[in-house]
């Protein structure tokens, strides 16, 4: 890990007295943030600059691309109130991820995950500050991205000050998200500990994906309903579609980080159990490299087969003439499409279509802002491409992800949600 360099690279978000940035009209701020997101280097965060930010609102937006990756632009594209609430909620979720990733002691990790959501129940009007977030005393930091996430936890008080400005019902939605996600992480942490750092079957993997991304997707739908003055209770079909979509999205994170996760002692497939702790890139072991490729290919195929649920997710956003939320949803799928195209090439698949730049993806999402039909067309094109790639993979003999190991006898944790509602690719 390189030492932080002197100087700040956050000149695009000038120093403000506290609260002033919050008064900048969000359409103006949105443009600056989207341009910033196109240029920011998520692998090389400006730790000195981030430590030097004292304005809460500025800190939230400066930290977001380092915590949320491609989600950052999707959040920024939302309507202003929804964007601010979602940004804070996502940073809290990233803090939970940081406890899970960087706290090496299981008892300390579980305690932090249990305590963190409870602090959000404090009434900001009755206290000057929320209770302090649990500290991470001995962090397992692998790279500068980890260092940025650790810094986020250390400066949680700045995020808290933005959170305290939200209405009570908005804070409650954030609490519901963080509490649900923390409970899910405690479950996954216990499973990893019990099974030596490995998920053993498809049920465990899909539940893990739902616990990590499913709750944020459900939160986003509930938030939009709240801001449209509708009940925040989601119909069960919409909740299930959100969970299936979360499997597709989280498998992108899983397939991207297989090598990094192995190095820190975690595997999402039992084929890699004997490779825990190994450095795939440094060892140049052909058999290890092929095992990783096989697992990545199986999980990629599994993800692509879940894409049809995205059609239903888009439909649940409604049919308003102008919809930033609709454009944000299309942008999220465009980013996911771009990643999976690259992942396909990484495992040796023939390519489908051409990858687009960040600017190209933003331009591709803009028609969805003005037209429901254009949004449906963009989503349908990607879903069909995913389905075709998955069918071709199965025809070439790519097995179901967990058919290559004898995992049937391994007990899975009791499900908290109903089984996946996979839509037909031919629909």
Image (cartoon, helix red, strand yellow):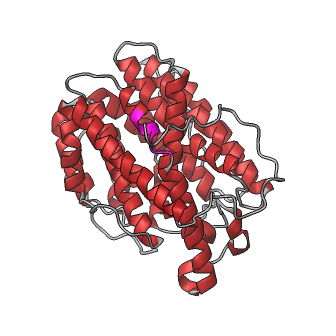
Q: Please tell me in which quadrant of the rendered image residue 84 appears.
A: top left
Image quarter (top left, top right, bottom left or bottom right) of the C terminus: top left
Give the percent coordinates (x, y) of residue 222.
Answer: 45, 24
Judge whether 304 appears above or below 46 on screen.
above
Which residue is situated farthest in the left direction here? 28
Give the percent coordinates (x, y) of residue 403.
Answer: 69, 59
Judge whether 353 appears above or below 259 on screen.
above
Give the percent coordinates (x, y) of residue 381.
Answer: 31, 46
Q: Is residue 152 visible?
A: yes
Q: How many marks?
A: 0
Judge whether 401 appears above or below 77 on screen.
below
Q: Between residue 391 and residue 222, name the one nearer to us.
A: 391
Q: Residue at x 62, y 74 (%)?
A: 291
Q: Which residues lie in the magenta part?
A: 306-311
269 vs 29, left or right, is right
Give the percent coordinates (x, y) of residue 73.
Answer: 30, 46
Magenta residue check for 276: no
Q: Residue at x 61, y 44 (%)?
A: 134
Magenta residue check for 309: yes
184 vs 232, left or right, is right
204 vs 116, left or right, is right
Q: Between residue 392 and residue 241, name the one nearer to us.
A: 392
Q: Residue at x 27, y 63 (%)?
A: 354
Q: Is residue 55 visible?
A: no
Which residue is situated farthest in the right direction here? 409
């Amino acid at each position: 890990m390189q030492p932080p360099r002197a100087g700040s690279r956050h000149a695009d978000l000038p120093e403000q007295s506290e609260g002033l940035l919050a008064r900048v009209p969000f359409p103006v701020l949105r443009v600056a943030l989207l341009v910033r997101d196109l240029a920011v280097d998520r692998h090389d965060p400006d730790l000195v600059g981030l430590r030097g930010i004292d304005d809460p609102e500025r800190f939230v937006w400066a930290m977001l691309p380092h915590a949320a990756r491609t989600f950052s632009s999707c959040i920024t594209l939302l309507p202003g109130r929804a964007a601010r609430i979602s940004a804070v909620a996502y940073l809290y979720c990233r803090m939970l991820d940081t406890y899970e990733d960087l706290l090496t002691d299981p008892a300390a990790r579980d305690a932090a995950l249990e305590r963190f959501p409870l602090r959000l129940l404090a009434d900001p009007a009755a206290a000057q500050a929320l209770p302090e977030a649990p500290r991470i005393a001995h962090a397992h930091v692998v790279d500068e991205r980890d260092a940025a996430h650790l810094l986020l936890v250390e400066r949680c008080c700045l995020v808290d000050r933005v959170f305290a400005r939200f209405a009570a019902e908005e804070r409650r939605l954030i609490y519901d998200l963080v509490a649900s996600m923390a409970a899910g992480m405690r479950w996954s942490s216990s499973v990893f500990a019990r099974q030596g750092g490995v998920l053993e079957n498809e049920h465990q993997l899909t539940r893990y994906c739902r616990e990590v991304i499913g709750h944020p997707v459900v939160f986003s739908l509930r938030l939009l309903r709240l801001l449209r003055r509708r009940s925040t209770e989601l119909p069960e079909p919409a909740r299930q579609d959100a969970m299936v979509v979360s499997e597709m999205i989280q498998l992108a994170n899983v397939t991207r980080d297989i090598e990094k996760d192995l190095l820190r002692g975690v595997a999402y497939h039992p084929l890699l159990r004997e490779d825990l702790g190994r450095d795939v890139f440094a060892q140049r072991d052909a058999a290890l490299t092929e095992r990783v490729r096989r697992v990545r290919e199986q999980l990629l195929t599994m993800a692509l087969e879940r894409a049809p649920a995205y059609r239903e997710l888009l439909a649940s956003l409604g049919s308003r003439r102008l919809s930033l939320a609709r454009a944000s949803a299309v942008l999220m799928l465009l980013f996911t499409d771009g990643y999976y195209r690259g992942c396909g090439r990484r495992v040796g698949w023939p390519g489908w279509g051409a990858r687009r730049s960040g600017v190209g993806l933003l331009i591709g999402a803009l028609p969805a802002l003005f037209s429901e039909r254009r949004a449906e067309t963009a989503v349908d094109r990607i879903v069909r491409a995913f389905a075709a790639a998955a069918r071709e993979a199965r025809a070439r003999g790519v097995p179901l992800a967990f058919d290559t190991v004898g995992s049937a006898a391994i007990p899975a944790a009791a499900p908290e949600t109903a089984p996946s509602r996979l839509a037909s690719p031919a629909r």
